[in-house]
Image (cartoon, grey):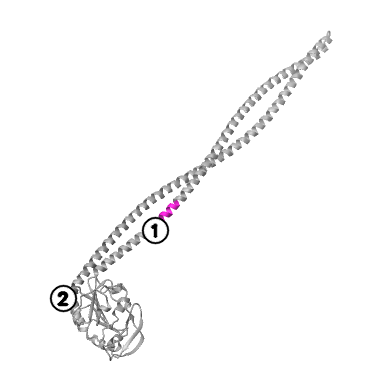
Amino acid sequence: MKECINYLLQYIQKPLNSLLYIGAGTGSSIPVLKKFKAENLTLVEGSTQLYAALEQKAKKHSGIISFKNWVFPGSNQKGDVFTYNNPRYNSLLSQERLASSHPNLKLISKEIVAGISINSLLSKFSSENDQANILILSVNGGERFLLESADKNLIEKFEYVILDGLTHFAERFPETLTGALENFTVLPNLSTGIECCIIQRVDCLIQAKNLAEKQLQETEEIKRSCEKIEAILKTVLDERDNLQIKLTELLTIKKQIEGELQVKSEKTNELNAFNQKKQEIISKLEQEIKSNSSNFKELKSEYEILEVQYKQLNVELIEVSKAKGNQEKIISEFEHEISLKTSICNELTEKLESVEIKNNQLNNKLTEMSGTLVTRESRISELEEEVSLKTSNCNEFTEKLESVEIKNNQLNNKLTEMSGTLVTCENRISELEEEVSLKTSNCNEFTEKLESVEIKNNQLNNKL
């Protein structure tokens, strides 16, 4: 462990924040670990026998936290534990591979034990940009078992991971790490005989990958936004189509109303022409009535004059009858004259009766015409009210039509704006895809350079 720590110290360029040691054993490495000068030093051991010694040594140093717990892979809080006659070899995995090299090593028990998961333990540590964290694993072959089951984001809180006590490292870890360790690289091999391996977090790869993931997330968000915009656009287009259908229906209704108004207007003109003719007939009848009334007055005046003359003649006849001489002759003359006057009077009376009958007929006809006129005027009023109502409805439909046209224009404007936004989003997606492609290319170049450096280091180590 001492050689491993001295080797690692030449790589560390940041002050240490936390150092976590899983499988700390009896705590014999505490003096060496103090060289890291970490602000937080945490030691974990599952074996009861080993932890008793660890606890005693930890109490002699300040700033050390120690606790007894078995650490299980992933999020498991319990699991199998293999206990041997030598507690240094207690592990989560069977140690059958050591049977040939350690013939005295015997398995005492295999039992399910409660503990803490690797994810729960790593989540207790924070990551600071200006400070480094170190994770040390000494779990008798279970290192890869724990690391590959851990959450990738939790492992990447640690800049360096030391795998202590490993033999045949190349068989356990390939040169290219994957899964939770995909952003780590193996440091060059240590001197011969040192059973230790160090893997380092490659921050530039993490940053490039995080940036690529962020850009992909932004691209996905933009795509989702574009899908939402397309859905809204489709809704707007459907609404516009519905409004156009309604507009067509309103235009059809408007044409029907205009046709009805045209028919009503023609009927109104016909009624006005009929009323005009009726007024002309009434005027003629009134003139005829006035003329007949004037003739009647003249005849009546003549009749009154004749009646006066008749009375005078009667008076004269009475006076003559009293007189003497030629009375019969005078009476005969007067009778003849009276008869003539009576005949004239009868003729005038007949004419007067005829005039009265004709006057009554004209009055009856005038009454009928007046009733017809009232009926026509009532019908004209009804038609005028109906025309007014239809005109009002036409105005309302015209206002609705104008409102629909305004809304249609607004929807067209909104459609134009959304189309512009969609074009902008597509341009932004293209730019992001180009940028992601560029970052990926840069990341591949860096990976190739890193592999080239590793090859050169291996060649130098082989020469050494």
At 36% from the left and 59% from the top, the residue drawn is 223
* In-front residue for pair 238/137: 137
- Quadrant in which residue 436 is drawn: bottom left
Q: Going from the N terminus, do you reach mark 2 or mark 1 first? A: 1
Name the mark on residue 313. none
- Quadrant in which residue 313 is drawn: top right
* SS at badge 2: helix
* In-front residue for pair 398/82: 82
Residue 330 to residue 289: above or below: above
* In-front residue for pair 325/17: 17
Instruction: Kindly identify the amino acid type of the residue bearing the numbered disc 2.
Output: Lys
Residue 315 can be seen, yes or no = no
- Identify the magenta region: 227-239
Q: Which residue is mark 2?
A: 463
**Quadrant that contains the C terminus:** bottom left
In the image as oriented, which residue stretches furthest toward the top?
A: 325
Q: Residues within 10 Å of mark 1 (few under 14, many from 20)?
A: few
* SS at badge 1: helix
* Whole-percent x, y for residue 352 in the image: 72, 22
Residue 202 can be seen, yes or no = yes
Alpha carbons under labels 2 and 1: distance apart: 62 Å
Count of numbered badges drawn on the protein: 2
**Quadrant that contains the N terminus:** bottom left
Instruction: Kindly identify the amino acid type of the residue bearing the numbered disc 1.
Output: Lys
Name the mark on residue 228. 1
* Contact check, label 2 and label 1, Cβ < 8 Å: no
Main SS of the magenta part reads helix
Does the magenta portion include 237?
yes
* Whole-percent x, y for residue 344 in the image: 75, 17
Residue 317 to residue 424: above or below: above
At 32% from the left and 58% from the top, the residue drawn is 429
At 83% from the left and 8% from the top, the residue drawn is 326
